[in-house]
Image (cartoon, rainbow, N blue to C red):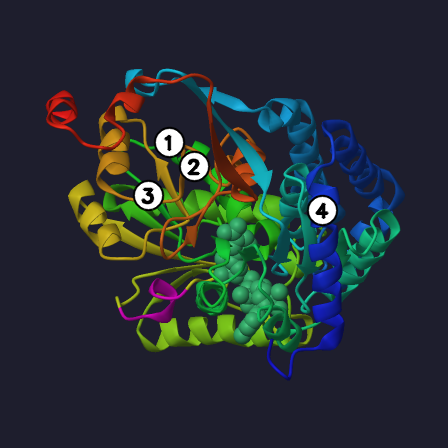
Amino acid sequence: MTDFMDNRYFELFNAQKKHQYNVGNTSYNQRIKKLNALHRAIQYTYKQAIREALFADFKKPPIETNLTEIYLVVREIKHAKANLRHWMKRQKVPTPLALLGTSSYYKYEPKGVCLIMSPWNYPLNLTFSPLVSAIAAGNTIIIKPSELTPNISKVMATIVKDLFEEHEVALIEGGVEVSQELLKLPFNHIFFTGSPAVGKIVMAAASKHLTSVTLELGGKSPTIIDETASIKEAIDSLVWGKYLNNGQTCIAPDYVLIHSSKKAEFIKAYKEKVLYYYSKDASTSDSYSRVVNNKHFNRLTNYIEDAKTHGANIELGGNFDVGDNFIEPTVISNLKEEAKLLNEEIFGPILPLKTFDEIDEVITYLNNKEKPLALYIYSQSNETIEKIISNTRAGTTCINTNALQVSNHNLPFGGSNGSGIGKTHGFFGFQDFSNQRAVLRRHTKGPLNLLLPPYTKFKQKLAD
Ligand code: NAD
């Protein structure tokens, strides 16, 4: 341990380390009891406090809090409760002929002491959903939520204190310095959700102790709209997916690649839908949240300025109010390839639009970029859909909709390389917080006994 390690974290870590076998040996019923307590806390006891905290943090509409924070954690809990008995069971495997006389199984054992580091954009969901998987798998857990949403961070700290002993689950509030101190500890697993840049810092720290990692990262998630797509259907889900949480969603459609023949129809329908969803002045709409802070607001308005200097067309919006961290729903087309909007994760209410004529152009374009966390396809052509899926790489994909893949807990959720390592949700989350321990038991002598030393000529012949 280094000298500048904060002693409190070291002591907490050691307390959890000591306690890990008690937690690891908890029964199915004991784990369910913990999940039930978490369920009650977020769906009933603290529901109102959660909604108020998220509204205070970035004007998140209470309906969005219900749907994208509380509901998703409750789904995760219900799914774990329905399946945990099966997940915890020993999994018998067949025995090959050469190992006759033995039997084998593997079991999911807890990794041990785990760290969950979470971002600010869905702070409750992205902290408590991995917590559900970690509890289900029988780990002890230290949580470090984001400092950028302090109100919800406080509510989560209260919930954790209310429900758990510190040597079982503890939550530490704080910023980068706290993360950096925690990352010095030899955790058995780190589950990090956040930006690719910080993901690299986490992975480098983890490598010092050979700690395993799940990295749920971000990046640019493209949306392809081909010439066969129904624009009306595409618009319904696309406008919602783009402005949900004010575009601050890891799987938000980051930019649209649209067939040239559909561009005009798309822009017209998009404008109408924005007007319908958020009214003429979105700053007065109760359905439209804000950019989380001034730093991100400046980053985003800088993208708009950058686009203008590159001669792009502002098709919709483009105005902002610095005092309120408000940016209008914005669509920009005709961007130069070097524009920031086409190269950096946007994470805000700005949609770049890029046209194409042949689907092969799109495939080449995408394969020269990082593998995205999500790739969306709007098309009525099965041939095109299959061609895109087979010839590109992505963590997740939706066809003729977007963002919904996150709410099916039977699906693995996560990126690939630049957009993430490892998977979460349901069984996949349980698996990432577990070690698959292989166990082989010998019952009687088997054929391999014939090949024990001394290696006579006869035995050599047998082995040939
Ligand atoms: P972030 O990487 O800045 O912060 C995430 C966590 O890391 C926070 O707890 C923060 O305190 C900590 N942190 C920040 N800088 C650090 C440093 N230098 N050293 C150690 N710890 C540090 O991410 P964010 O801004 O909170 O969230 C936005 C990013 O998260 C986007 O890239 C988004 O795509 C991604 N994201 C991914 C998912 C997913 O499920 N894949 C979900 C939500 C967000």
Residue 230 circle label: 1
- Is residue 347 among the parts visible in the rendering? no
Q: CA distance from mark 4 to mark 1?
A: 30 Å
Viewer-nearest residue: 48 or 401: 48
In front of the other: 406 or 449: 449
What residue did someone put label 3 on? Answer: 224
- Describe the element under mark 1 as helix, strand or loop: loop
Mark 4 vs mark 3, foreground winner is 4
Residue 34 sits in quarter: top right
Element marked by disc 3 = strand
Q: Are marks 1 and 2 in contact (CB under 8 Å)?
A: yes
Identify the residue at image location x=43%, y=51%. Answer: 421
The residues colored magenta run: 338-344
Residues tagged 2 and 4 counted as in contact (Cβ below 8 A):
no
Kind of residue sitting beneath label 2: Ala
Q: Whole-Å distance between the Cαs marked 4 and 3?
A: 28 Å
Q: Amino acid at mark 3?
A: Ile
**For ligand 1, which image quadrant applies?**
bottom right
Residue at image coords 13%, 22%: 458
Residue 348, given in percent of the width and then of the height, sits at 52, 61
Q: Earlier in the sequence, mark 2 or mark 3?
A: 3
The label nearer to you, 4 versus 1, is 4
Q: Which residue is mark 4?
A: 65
Closer to viewer: mark 2 or mark 3: 3
For the C terminus, the image quarter is: top left
The residue that disc 2 covers is 234
- 102 lies above or below 429: above
- First reached walking from the N terminus: tag 3 or tag 1: 3
Which residue lies most toward the bottom here? Answer: 3
